[in-house]
Image: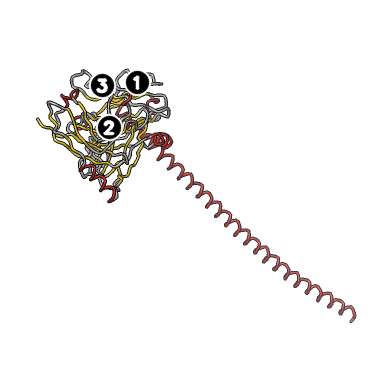
Amino acid sequence: MRNKSIVASFASVMVVAIVAGCGNDGETNETNQNHDGENETADQELDSEMKENQEEEKHSESVNNDSDNENESEEERNEAYYESLAVTDDTREVAPEAIEHLELPGIHENTRIYNGTVSPGQMVRFVFPDDEHESGFNYQNALDPHVSDEGHFSVSFSNYDLNDMEQIRFIVSGFLPQEQAFDLPIHPEEEGMAYIPSEADTEELEAAVQEEVELDDIYENTRFYHVQHVVEDVDAVHLEHPEIGFSEDLNLPAADVELENTISTSFDENVLTAGDTLTFYIVAKGVTTLVEKDVQGWTDEEWAVINTIKNETSIDEIVATEPIIVGKTVPHASITITNLNPRNFNTTIEADEEGQFEMDLSGSRDEMDGEAILFSIVDEEGHLATMEVPVQE
């Protein structure tokens, strides 16, 4: 009986052990399956992240490539455009140095001021059409603007009628195998194209010019504006005003060194209003510098003084054949005498202590063919009065 009991007990223990063993294997398998699932999920997340990174890298490369392609396309377009304008033949090709820094904006029939850029150290010329020359251009009458050390140039076309031209020849030389010409087409007139600026950064050069510019005040009754020294080495000065528009060059060509860098212009009566802004375009040192001047007004008390000056001024009859000007105004006044139409001379004299003044213009007899003489009278306090006197035959 005891042996049977031992056998039974051993059998029971084996059954329990087997059952227990089966239970542990199930848990182990389940755990292994869970770990396998977690690893698979992590692998999937890593693959997804890697794919996203790869896509971002591809997108970034695509954007950079597109940007590079756009830049390259713009450079290629500019290069192709300038090459299409270049004057070439079997022995003359476009040198890369001629277009490396080249900037030639479009020119219009109403363009008065033009700015561009070449490589530093190069020189430029503008040559205009002339049917009398075999080449079709007058190289003897070339316009050669100043080029800054940085390669910037600015030029006024005021003395040329672009309406009669189909193109202008632009020539660049210096640091080239041979000079290179480009034929620039003249586009139809377009609003806002009187002044063609450069896209290059010329602010520093313009600021240097602006510091040197000297412009006198302008008043609402100013009829004649004359500045003896605008800035050193000025090439041209243009004026823009809502009523006047864009003027021609105001710079006076002068053989007298003392009159160099001088500008002069006249205004019709009542064209200026206090508070107006006049914009001066100053072409000098390879750039165009814009300077604004506000039109000054007078107070009622100042207008009363101005009217007094007019009332106290009398001028004898002016005869074209006997151009001696005699008059009387307020004591010690400054009188500027200007031939308005054509505006071919002006001179300034001082009245004596009694206001008497006299000027012999016999040396300008041939120029006294205008309709009127303008008198600009400034008293000792700076009040300005203006009056016109007709010229008799």
- Picture quadrant of residue 48: bottom right
Q: Which of marks 1 and 3 is nearer the N terminus?
A: 3
Residue at image position (36%, 19%) is: 178
Say which residue label 3 marks: 141
Q: In this view, does 313 lie above or below 369?
A: below
Q: Which of 85 and 383 is in front in this view?
A: 383
**Is the Cβ of the residue at disc 2 closer than 8 Å to that at disc 3?**
no
Numbered circle sitting on residue 38:
none
Q: Which of marks 2 and 3 is nearer the N terminus?
A: 3
Q: Which amino acid does label 3 sit on?
A: Asn
Q: Position of residue 245 (x, y in %)?
A: 24, 41
Q: Which amino acid does label 1 sit on?
A: Glu
- 167 vs 261, left or right, is left
Quadrant of the image for the C terminus? top left
> Within 10 Å of the Cα at label 3, are there few (<14), some (14-19), or many (20+) other Cα atoms?
few
- 301 vs 19, left or right, is left
Residue at image position (78%, 71%) is: 17
Residue 107 visible in the shown view: no
Residue 272 visible in the shown view: yes
Label 1, secondary structure: give it: loop
Say which residue label 2 marks: 350
